[in-house]
């Protein structure tokens, strides 16, 4: 597979994430550079993974998706890093589906509302549920939708992890456990 970035950094400051340490500023890569990368990969692979920490925060993404759709390259796309649920909307979901995205990873981390707020407030469970609903309505099947869940955070109980996994199972999507590791 090929790896593409449309941006570096992340506008959020989640307590468990090192991105803000590694890339203090959020920078968008010009669309033409991305299209050139996709052209390069077209003859080498069928699969492209977007490794952005904040793919949906890229204000150029709707236009970039239009360009990708127009290319008709046959490439399959994957969102390896978690998407910010509150930024999943009908337009983006439809365009990602039309552009041939095959795996959609959402960042949930936990369903504990206190821990959601304490770690940066980038997602609520309601926003996660809405993102799943929008993706399904856009045409994504449940087996293409995945959720990242953190475990081992300070003060986190095992019941919370089980409840988070159960929510994913109830939605018929795939939970993925990610081990918490301190960054300081």
Image (cartoon, rainbow, N blue to C red):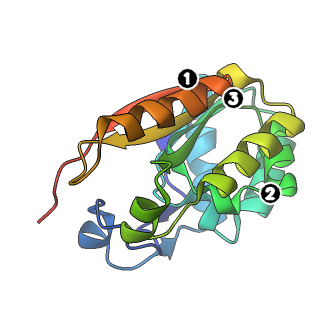
Tell me which numbered mark, 1 or 3, is placed earlier along the sequence.
1
**In the depicted view, which residue is nearer to us: 148 or 91?**
148
Can residue 1 be seen here? no
Q: Residue at x 11, y 66 (%)?
A: 184
Residue 150 seen from this side:
yes
In the image, 165 versus 75, the foreground residue is: 165
Where is residue 167 drawn, in percent x and y?
59, 33
Q: Is residue 166 above or below residue 156?
A: above
Q: Is residue 175 above or below residue 92?
A: above
Mark 2 closeness class: few <14, some 14–19, many ≥20 residues within 10 Å: some
What is the CA distance from the residue labelled 1 to the residue labelled 3? 32 Å
Instruction: Residue at 26% x, 62% y: name it.
Output: 18
Number of numbered discs: 3
Instruction: Tell us which disc is closer to us: 2 or 3.
Output: 3
Q: CA distance from mark 2 to mark 3?
A: 18 Å
| Label 3 CA crowd tier, 10 Å (few <14, some 14–19, many 20+) | some
x and y, in percent, of residue 150 in the image? 35, 43
Numbered disc 1: secondary structure? loop
Residue holding disc 1: 45
In which quarter of the view is residue 127 placed?
bottom right
- Name which of mark 1 and mark 2 comes first in the sequence: 1
The residues tagged by marks 1 and 2 sit, at their Cα atoms, a distance apart of: 29 Å
Residue holding disc 3: 171
Residue 131 is situated, as x and y percent measured from the top left of the image, at 72, 49
Q: Which residue is mark 2?
A: 89
Mark 1, other Cα within 10 Å: few <14 / some 14–19 / many ≥20: few
**Disc nearer the start of the sequence (2/3):** 2
Q: Secondary structure at mark 3?
A: loop
Q: Secondary structure at mark 2?
A: loop
């Amino acid at each position: 597979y090929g790896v593409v970035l449309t941006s570096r950094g992340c506008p959020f400051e989640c307590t468990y994430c090192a991105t803000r340490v590694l890339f203090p500023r959020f920078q968008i890569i010009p669309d033409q550079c991305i299209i050139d990368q996709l052209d390069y990969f077209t003859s080498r692979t069928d699969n492209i993974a977007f490794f952005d920490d904040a793919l949906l925060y890229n204000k150029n993404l709707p236009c970039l998706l239009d360009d990708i759709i127009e290319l008709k390259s046959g490439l399959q796309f994957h969102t390896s890093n978690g998407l910010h649920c509150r930024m999943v909307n009908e337009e983006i979901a439809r365009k990602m589906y039309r552009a041939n995205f095959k795996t959609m990873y959402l960042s949930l981390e936990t369903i504990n509302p206190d821990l959601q707020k304490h770690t940066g407030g980038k997602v609520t469970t309601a926003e996660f549920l809405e993102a799943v609903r929008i993706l399904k309505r856009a045409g994504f099947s449940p087996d293409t939708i995945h959720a990242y869940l953190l475990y081992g955070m300070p003060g986190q109980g095992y019941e919370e992890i089980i409840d988070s996994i159960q929510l994913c199972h109830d939605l018929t999507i795939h939970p993925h456990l990610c081990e918490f590791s301190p960054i300081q």
